[in-house]
Image: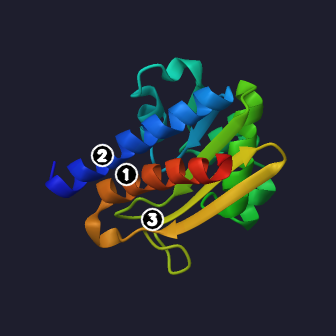
Amino acid sequence: MNEFISNMRADIDKTAQNVVQLLKNKKLRVSTAESCTGGLLSGAFTGVAGSSQVFELGICAYANKIKEQFLGVSAETLENSGAVSAQCACEMALGIREAAKADIGISVTGIAGPDGGTFEKPVGTVFFACVYGNKCNVLHIRANSEHGREFIRFEAVRQALILMLNTLI
């Protein structure tokens, strides 16, 4: 692992610790729905000692049928907006929050590459959603695909944690 990725992981670990502490302080529980990060966001939470007090459930939903069956993403959303969209991210976050009976649902869906990108949604396109209360806060990034798949996935985890902090503060 190169030094750049090592530094990125250290930043993720520190941010995850801050999020877990904030969740503990607010007595809130979170669940994750992930696609392009493949469980890395759940891993960031569970890598923090004491995270069992705040982490409920994580689902890695790569396939659209899993997004529909387990997270309640509508077929209409998948057909009209696509799996990599703000609408899908919101439905994933809402679905995981409801499935786990958690206070917060957070989701990540995107294209980590190196294949799968299109002109409209190139590799590095990632959508995030954090559902808390009656709000669905959405974030959209285009991570630099020149750094590769690993960078995109770690950057997505980092951005998801920052979105959570911004939602809760």
Dot 1 falls on a residue whose secondary structure is helix
In the displayed structure, 121 sits above or below 47; it is below
How far from the left and from the top, in percent, is residue 131?
73, 46
Dot 3 falls on a residue whose secondary structure is loop
Where residue 98 sits, quadrant-wise, is: top right
In the displayed structure, 121 sits above or below 20; it is below
The dot on residue 116 is: 3
Q: Nearer the viewer, mark 3 or mark 1?
A: 1
- Using the rendered image of the protein, determine whether residue 135 is visible from the camera's viewpoint: yes
**Mark before the other along the chain sequence, 3 or 1:** 3
Give the amino acid type for the residue marked by disc 2 in the picture.
Arg
The single residue placed furthest to the bottom in the displayed view is 119
Marks 2 and 1 in Cβ contact (< 8 Å): yes
Q: Residue at point 58% right, 53% down?
A: 163
Dot 2 falls on a residue whose secondary structure is helix
Camera-nearest residue between 162 and 153? 162
Give the amino acid type for the residue marked by disc 3 in the picture.
Gly
Give the amino acid type for the residue marked by disc 1 in the picture.
Phe
Q: Residue at point 43% right, 44% down?
A: 15
Mark 3 surroundings: few (<14), some (14-19) or many (≥20) residues within 10 A: few
The single residue placed furthest to the right in the displayed view is 134
